[in-house]
């Protein structure tokens, strides 16, 4: 079997590569897709895993339009390197509002759901690029010359900044460092 250190040496509780975290994400997304399957929808979709969900634009549109339930957001949040304050800033809501979503177990608005998925995509790409959440977190918090000496984390507050971060991760993957 695997040792925890084989997956994430530092943030063992926040690692996309750990089987327990991955299983939780897989269960959460399949449940949400099934739930949205009962509502009128644009597409008929089925996904078996979180990774499959993030690569299926039809499934993403289905979740965005139906509103992401807090339980799926919570699974995504728990597998990411971002703090509650970061998530509040990304979603442009107060920490108190985020707590209200949790207490009421309600779904996020479509615009917030889209932002959550955008951040999930960045996280997936970052973990793929750096190998684990801890290295990705360090990169996010370090000013980056190629991004104008801005911390990549600061750019995740809007879609254009997110695209800049993704582009830089792609360049790193290809060995094109600025």
Image (spheres, rainbow, N blue to C red):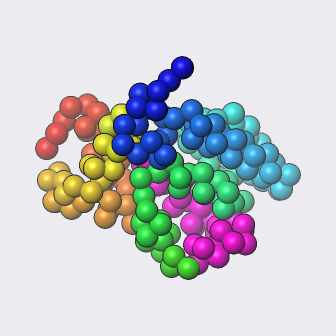
Name, please, the residue furthest toward the right: 38
Q: How far across and down, in percent of the image, does residue 63 sit? A: 67, 54
Residue 11 sits in quarter: top left
Q: Position of residue 167 (x, y in %)?
A: 31, 46
Which residue is at 49% across, 46% downward?
A: 13
- Residue 43 visible? The answer is no
Choose between 75 and 158: the one closer to the eye.
75
Quarter of the C terminus within the rendering: top left
Q: Which residues are magenta?
A: 97-124
**x, y (%) of residue 52?**
60, 35
Give the image quarter of residue 127: top left
Q: Is residue 12 left or right of residue 52?
A: left
Q: Is residue 115 magenta?
A: yes
| Residue at screen point 51% across, 35% down | 18
Name the residue: 25% across, 37% down: 172
| 49 magenta-colored | no
* Residue 99 appearing in the image: yes
Q: Is residue 20 left or right of residue 131?
A: right
By secondary structure, the bulk of the magenta-drawn segment is best described as: helix
Quadrant (top left/top right/bottom left/bottom right) for the N terminus: top right
Q: Residue at x 51, y 61 (%)?
A: 115
Closest to the observer, 118 or 94: 94
From the top left corner, tell me how far across and down residue 90 is, in percent.
Answer: 45, 67
Specify whether 114 is left or right of 143: right
């Amino acid at each position: 079997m695997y040792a925890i250190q084989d997956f994430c040496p530092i943030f063992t509780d926040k690692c996309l590569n750990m089987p327990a975290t991955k299983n939780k994400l897989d269960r959460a997304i399949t449940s949400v897709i099934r739930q949205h399957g009962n509502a009128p929808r644009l597409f008929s979709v089925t996904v078996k895993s979180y990774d499959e969900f993030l690569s299926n634009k039809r499934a993403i549109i289905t979740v965005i339009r139906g509103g992401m339930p807090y339980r799926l957001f919570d699974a995504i949040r728990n597998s990411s390197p971002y703090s509650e304050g970061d998530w509040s800033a990304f979603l442009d809501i107060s920490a108190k509002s985020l707590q209200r979503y949790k207490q009421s177990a309600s779904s996020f608005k479509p615009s917030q759901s889209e932002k959550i998925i955008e951040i999930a995509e960045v996280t997936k790409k970052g973990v793929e690029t750096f190998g684990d959440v801890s290295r990705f977190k360090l990169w996010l918090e370090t000013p980056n010359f190629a991004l104008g000496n801005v911390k990549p984390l600061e750019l995740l507050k809007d879609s254009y900044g997110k695209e800049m971060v993704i582009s830089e991760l792609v360049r790193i993957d290809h060995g094109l460092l600025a």
